[in-house]
């Protein structure tokens, strides 16, 4: 289930990089459409989010795997917002990204073809952190 309380922490997308972690400072259509995968990076407060469950969003809408679609039928923090449903579990990880960012969401080419408006706008992505609980666990 999606969480029904308010997030304890939130971060907006801070930058993009290639799968190999090469920063991309601005919208490049070549990067957006031809790079097979890319990362959206977030600056997070590591101590504050330790042990919390992340939920990634796009324009405030939760990004869910298609197996999690039933989660939107139960009242939650995201009620009234249609989810972005994806056929693959999003790639998620930690590392050293651009401008001091430490957490990433990995996107694939099909995403970028369907969402050209996101090119150059990592701030459209977000990550909300909630207490652990009954949230479906995907890989990552």
Image: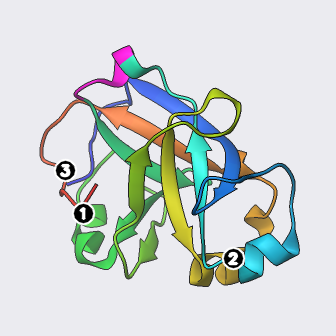
Residue 120 rendering spot, x and y as whole percentages? 82, 56
Mark found first going from the N terminus, 3 or 1: 1
In the picture, the disc for residue 13 is none
In the picture, the disc for residue 135 is 3
Marks 2 and 1 sit apart, C-alpha to C-alpha, by: 32 Å
Please report the bounds of the magenta region as a residue range. Answer: 47-51
Residue 125 rendering spot, x and y as whole percentages? 60, 50
Q: Nearer the viewer, mark 2 or mark 3?
A: 2
Residue ranking furthest to the left: 134
Marks 2 and 3 sit apart, C-alpha to C-alpha, by: 31 Å
Neighbourhood count class around disc 3 (C-alpha, 10 Å): few under 14, some 14–19, many 20 upward: some
Neighbourhood count class around disc 2 (C-alpha, 10 Å): few under 14, some 14–19, many 20 upward: some
Mark found first going from the N terminus, 2 or 3: 2
- What residue did someone put label 2 on? 35
Considering the image in quadrants, where does the C terminus appear?
Answer: bottom left
Quick one: SS at disc 2?
loop
């Amino acid at each position: 289930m999606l969480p029904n309380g308010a997030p304890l922490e939130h971060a907006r997308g801070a930058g993009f990089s290639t799968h190999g972690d090469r920063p991309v400072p601005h919208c490049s259509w070549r990067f957006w459409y031809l790079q097979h995968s890319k990362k959206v990076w977030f600056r997070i407060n590591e101590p504050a989010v330790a042990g919390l469950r992340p939920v990634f969003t796009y324009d405030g809408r939760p990004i869910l795997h298609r197996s999690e679609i039933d989660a939107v039928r139960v009242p939650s923090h995201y009620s009234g917002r249609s989810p972005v449903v994806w056929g693959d579990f999003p790639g998620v990880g930690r590392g050293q990204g651009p401008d001091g960012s430490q957490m990433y969401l990995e996107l694939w080419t099909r995403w970028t073809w369907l969402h050209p408006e996101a090119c150059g706008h990592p701030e459209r992505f977000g990550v909300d952190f909630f207490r652990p609980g009954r949230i479906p666990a995907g890989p990552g």
